[in-house]
Amino acid sequence: MKFADFIASAAIEANIEADAKEGVIREMVQSLVSADKLVAGESESIVKTILKREELGSTGIGRGVAVPHAKHASVKKPVGTVAVSQLGVDFNSLDGEKVQLIFLVISPPDRPGDHLRILENISRQLRDDTFCKFLKQAKTTEDIRHLLEEADNNHFGT
């Protein structure tokens, strides 16, 4: 599954303002609401579901990356967004480092295969050091969109 299949480009945040895990998740969920990809009345429930998933183990996977994700009945198809934090956010990452790249994904509970394919795609792309380096340096949402498109078209070494 490609980024274009689930990333809401209107919700991409090139310089997320929140400086804590919960704040980042809230800001990203709000971006998806503003992009008309999530129902506004469900945002608090979605945030709580993602935070509950974080309690199972941090989605800060290391190397400055976090992939908070959850399944929620209010979505009909998988949706996600990307945020970059220039200063970094403490996500209780496995390597103890602050996170600069955050990929947030919400999927319907009845589509676990799609959810896993999305996480697999994100993980595979994030193994590419050049892709991660360029994303961390991205200054605009257009830069991020372009990099995601290049990744979808296999322009990186993955």
Image (tube, grey):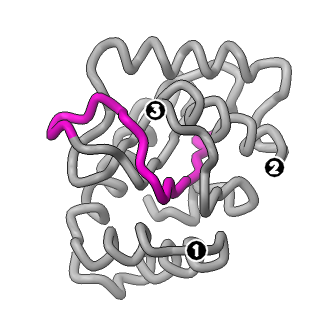
**Callout 2: SS:** loop
Q: Which mark is residue 35?
A: 2
> Is 134 left, or right, of 96 in this rendering?
right
Magenta segment, which residues?
77-96
Q: Which mark is residue 139?
A: 1
**Quarter in which the N terminus is drawn:** bottom left
Look at the image and say whether residue 94 sits in the magenta stretch: yes
Q: Nearer the viewer, mark 3 or mark 1?
A: 1
What residue do we see at 76% from left, 35% from top? 38
**Callout 1: SS:** loop
Q: Amino acid at mark 1?
A: Lys
> Is 136 left, or right, of 74 in this rendering?
left
Q: Amino acid at mark 2?
A: Ala
**Callout 3: SS:** strand
In the displayed structure, 77 sits above or below 50; it is below
Q: What whole-number distance in Å separates the C-alpha atoms at marks 1 and 2? A: 20 Å
Image location (x, y in percent) of residue 17: 63, 46
